[in-house]
């Protein structure tokens, strides 16, 4: 069996990298749904259907566990698939399969609290001293998942989201660095104006953005901590696999990369991030 990793495109490779580093002996298949990327501006039902199709493709290829290395799919499709599709699909396949997302580990990293912890609501007014900026796709921003889930756990953290409608597509299309830098600086400026100052910390809440993390670092005040979804997710998945031996991650250390788009080499941005040439097979 293998671990499947899914994203609309190359962004999920930022999570995949951390997973491979954490679990070097496991077998992995990465699937990029590049024929339909970007997801961020699509409607909810379409995102649910595309995510379900991607998961099925990975389960058919032998995955026991699929990680949605995509905030948009995790925010919009994951709960629906877990509640309405997976139980019957598991019966149909006759084996243990599951789909997990990246939002729970990110929120745990951002709050410093386990997911199960929900703060008791008190009536007194709380001063929100820690301002957290979340840069994401319009779909993730509309879901308000980071605001809602962080507010349940940490009433001293104020979350401000900034939707970046064109950024994932530009990264997917290998836009020049100066064009990306301009777009990112514009979003940091817009968010900072809205808050009244720069955020104290930031979540790059779209896995594509991690590929340009250095440009976010340049645009934010020096030293602003970034919460890394890849590391947080890899730690959480490693713990999950220990607690759930029914999901077999394999032990051959194999890696396959599939795309619903154009097979072949991927763009220079992701290859620089990955540190080696990457070639994708047709899904
Ligand atoms: N990388 C994905 C995310 O984390 C999706 C980006 C997109 O396709 O718009 O949201």
Image (tube, rainbow, N blue to C red):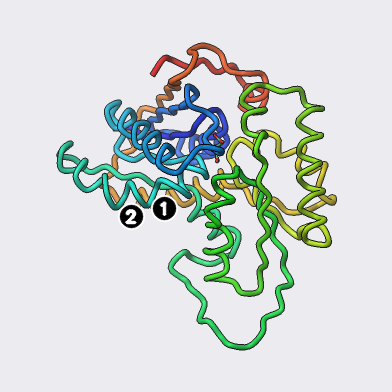
Q: Please give the name of the residue rendered at 68% of the width and 59% of the height, measured from the top-left corner.
A: 160
Relative to residue 185, is residue 236 depicted above or below?
A: below
Q: Please state, as top left, top right, bottom left or bottom right, where the N terminus lies in the image.
A: top left
Q: Quadrant of the C terminus?
A: top left
User: Are circles 2 and 1 on residues that touch, CB within 8 Å?
Assistant: yes
Which residue sits at x=71%, y=23%? 175
- Image spot of residue 42 (x, y percent): 51, 37
- Residue holding disc 1: 239
Judge left or right: residue 213 versus residue 85: right
Q: Position of residue 152 (x, y in %)?
A: 52, 71
Q: Residues within 10 Å of mark 1 (few under 14, many from 20)?
A: few
> Does dot 2 land on a helix, a strand or a loop?
helix
Residue neighbourhood size for the residue with mark 2, other residues' Cα within 10 Å, grouped as few (<14), some (14–19), many (≥20)? few
| Ligand 1, image quadrant it occupies | top right
* Residue bearing mark 2: 243
Compare residues 103 and 79 and report the one nearer the observer: 79
Q: Based on the displayed image, in which of its 4 quarters is residue 129 positioned?
A: bottom right
Residue 230, percent from left and from top:
56, 43
Farthest bottom residue?
Answer: 124
* Rendering quarter of residue 275: top right
């Amino acid at each position: 069996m293998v671990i499947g990793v899914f994203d609309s495109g190359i962004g999920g490779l930022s999570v995949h990298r951390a997973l491979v580093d954490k679990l070097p002996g496991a077998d992995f298949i990465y699937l990029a749904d590049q024929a339909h990327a970007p997801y961020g501006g699509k409607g909810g039902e379409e995102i649910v259907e595309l995510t379900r199709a991607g998961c099925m493709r990975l389960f058919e290829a032998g995955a026991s566990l699929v990680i949605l290395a995509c905030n948009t799919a995790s925010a919009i499709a994951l709960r629906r698939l877990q509640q309405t599709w997976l139980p019957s699909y598991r019966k149909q396949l006759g084996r243990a399969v599951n789909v997990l997302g990246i939002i729970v580990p990110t929120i745990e990293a951002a709050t410093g609290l386990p997911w199960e912890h929900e703060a008791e609501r008190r009536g007194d007014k709380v001063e929100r001293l820690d301002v957290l900026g979340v840069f994401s796709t319009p779909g993730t921003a509309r879901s308000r998942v980071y605001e809602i889930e962080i507010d349940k756990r940490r009433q001293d953290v104020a979350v401000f989201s900034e939707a970046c409608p064109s950024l994932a597509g530009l990264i997917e299309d290998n836009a020049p660095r100066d064009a990306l830098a301009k777009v990112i600086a514009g979003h940091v400026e817009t968010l900072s104006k809205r808050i009244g100052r720069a955020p104290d910390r930031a979540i790059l809440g779209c896995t594509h953005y991690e590929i340009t993390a250095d440009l976010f670092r340049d645009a934010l005040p020096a030293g602003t901590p970034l919460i890394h979804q890849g590391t947080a997710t890899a730690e959480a998945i490693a713990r999950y696999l220990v607690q759930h031996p029914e999901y077999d991650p394999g032990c051959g250390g194999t890696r396959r990369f599939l795309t619903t788009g154009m097979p072949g080499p991927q763009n220079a941005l992701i290859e620089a991030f990955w540190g080696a040439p990457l070639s994708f097979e047709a899904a």
